[in-house]
Image: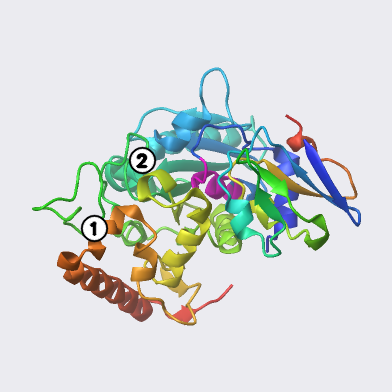
Amino acid sequence: MPNTKELARVEEAHKRFTGAHALCAGCGTPICVRTILNAIKEPVVVINATGCLEVATTRYPTTAWNVPWIHVAFENAAAVASGVETAYRVLRRRGKISKEIRFVAFAGDGGTYDIGLQALSGALERGHRFIYVCYDNEAYMNTGNQRSGATPFAAQTTTAPTGTRSFGKAQRRKDLTEIVAAHHIPYVAQASISDWYDLAAKARKAASVDGPAFLNVLSSCPRGWGHPSDQSVKIARLAVETCYWPLFEIIEGRWYLNYVPEEKLPVIEWLRPQKRFAHLFEPANQELLSEIQRQVDEDWERLLRRCERHETL
Amino acid sequence: MKRYEQNGFFLAIEPRRCKGCGICVQSCPMKVLILNDYGKVEVKEIARCVFCGLCEQRCPDFAISVHKNLVLRSSMVV
């Protein structure tokens, strides 16, 4: 199992992703990317969808990537990954490549939940051997905080503003992890940047399965969520502790819960530090808070029923 | 590049990479790090550091790293 020293050794050996990128101070995405890339021992090829990560790490003429990297368009990270993986498989069969290579696709929640969903679904169904990582910051943060399918209920965004007639996003978020699990792929997991050990272990498992693997990683966004930049990891941790973002994995169709908080915190603890939920704490919006708690409890109960075994890391 | 040495380990900070988010300050279990007046990370008291590596693991900007045996890893050289 990986520890910080081992991850640092891999980072030293490969230097896959480096600093001096232009992502905001306190962004959770580079933590997610470096942990995942350092946890994979084999050589990697990175496929990137459009998003914060792509825009901020590859400002011409510089790049933060030290691995083969490809970006085509917003919607087709999974389709590009299938093409690259197929080409690799053919070259390997002909004996032109002998190395074991892993293909990792990084996309934000906009490029996964909404725009890239059909490409992702197709690639999963065809069974290409690649790892798809969705860094979920719960809105289109690259273009300035527009709502996406991943935006939680009642969160304020620029396209779901608050006012006298609106309380932010009126719909519930999509449960993408379950949608992906319904493709019956070998490995699906939900992780958070706060639990690096869990995330690194999941990345390693994802790299070891023969077939598609999917990681949904909660990645906090100080600009969009409206919290101080030093609280990024703590906010992601609170999402796990309040069971808003449970850590679980699905291996060959069997559900395992990785972490059960000793004391399940009320979801209000996670909502309060974030400015996008500030309007919920006005007296008129009290019932919205209880509605969010009800939704979180409902999802957690359903997950508990699904998970046959609690496996703590 | 600043170095803070203790017991064969050292902490290296590259201020040019630091964006001053403060995640390392929050993550540090021993409260070794602070943000200085310029908003960059600095070591307050190296004697308390246990070299767990959490600051390195969580730094989004690769500005801070923990090294053993006083050999600087080449990935830190800008």
Left or right position of A156 against A239: left
**Quarter that holds the C terminus of chain B:** top right
Q: Earlier in the sequence, mark 1 or mark 2?
A: 2
Nearer to me, A234 or A170:
A234
- The chain letter under disc 2 is A
Q: Nearer the viewer, mark 1 or mark 2?
A: 1
Q: Position of residue A10 (x, y in %)?
A: 72, 47
Query: Type of residue at label 2?
Result: Met
**Quarter that holds the N terminus of chain B:** top right
The answer to whether residue B67 is above or below residue A263 is above
Q: Position of residue A176 (x, y in %)?
A: 32, 56
SS for callout 2:
loop
Nearer to me, A83 or A166:
A166
**Cβ atoms at labels 1 and 2 below 8 Å apart:** no
Q: Which residue is mark 2?
A: A141
Q: Residue at x 46, y 73 (%)?
A: A256
Q: Residue at x 65, y 52 (%)?
A: B57
Which residues lie in the magenta part? Answer: A25-36
Left or right position of A237 against A92: left
Q: Is residue A249 visible?
A: no
> From this viewpoint, which residue is outermost toward the top?
A61
Left or right position of A193 against A239: right
Q: Which mark is residue A45?
A: none
Residue A161 painted magenta: no
Q: Position of residue B56 (x, y in %)?
A: 68, 50
Query: Type of residue at label 1?
Result: His
User: Which picture quadrant has residue A3?
Assistant: bottom right
Q: Which residue is mark 1?
A: A279
Q: Is residue A255 visible?
A: yes
- The chain letter under disc 1 is A
